[in-house]
Image (cartoon, grey):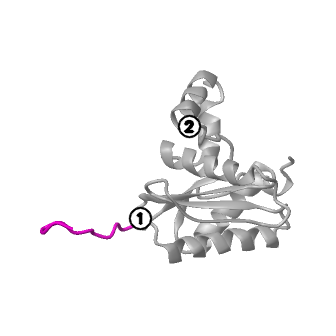
Amino acid sequence: MEEGYFLAPVASSLPLAAALRVLEGVLQAGREAELLPLSVVVLDGGAQIVASAREDGCGVLRFEIARGKAQGALGMGIGSRTIRDRLKERVAFQAAIAAASEGRFIPVPGGVLILDAQGQAIGAVGVSGDASDRDEYAAIAGIQGAGFASHPAEPAPGWKSAGL
């Protein structure tokens, strides 16, 4: 290595220990609510995967769906339920975002922002495996259980009875 050059460590906006607390909280919330097997992806603020898990019996595409929900939320700066609601009449724009993100844009509930004490997004969680509103519930519960705020702050009304 040349003199004067060094490798500096890169700090993540969401340390592994915090991401694992969120991940465990999501899975615990899913089990307590008797959700179908879940896939969970936790991203830092730079959309890098910090932690992920797929429960036994979870469908093979669920990881990619969970990642797309999280990345869509992080990329747009709002939870994926809000994205769905705001863009439901803008199909061409949704397609453009999907293309720009190389398919990592899933505009349905289950992508939730992780917010720090100042309300800034430091990461996102994507959950897939059950009905989207139920996925979102588990994401919110996991984030808040780990001591963070979330966007959205509350699950959708009627999330318990949401159907696939």
Q: CA distance from mark 1 to mark 2?
A: 23 Å
Residue 89 sits above or below residue 52 on the image: above
Furthest residue toward front: 1
68 or 9, nearer to the observer = 9
- Classified by dominant secondary structure, the portion drawn in magenta counts as loop
Query: Does any portion of residue 25 appear in the rendered image?
Result: yes
Furthest residue toward top: 92
Q: Which mark is residue 13?
A: 1
75 or 153, nearer to the observer = 75
Q: Residue at x 82, y 63 (%)?
A: 37
Magenta span of residues = 1-13
Earlier sequence position, callout 1 versus callout 2 = 1
Residue 18 at x, y percent in the picture: 52, 74
Assess disc 2: are there few (<14), some (14-19) or many (≥20) residues with their C-alpha within 10 Å of its C-alpha: few
Q: Which mark is residue 24?
A: none
Query: Does any portion of residue 110 appear in the rendered image?
Result: no
83 or 39, nearer to the observer = 39
Residue 19 at x, y percent in the picture: 55, 70
Which amino acid lies under the numbered mark 2 shown in the image of this protein?
A: Glu
> In the image, which is nearer the foreground, mark 1 or mark 2?
2
Q: Residue at x 73, y 56 (%)?
A: 135
Disc 2 designates what residue? 102
Q: Quadrant of residue 98?
A: top right
Residue 30 at x, y percent in the picture: 77, 67
Residue 7 at x, y percent in the picture: 27, 68
Q: Residue at x 66, y 30 (%)?
A: 88
Residue 145 sits above or below residue 99 on the image: below
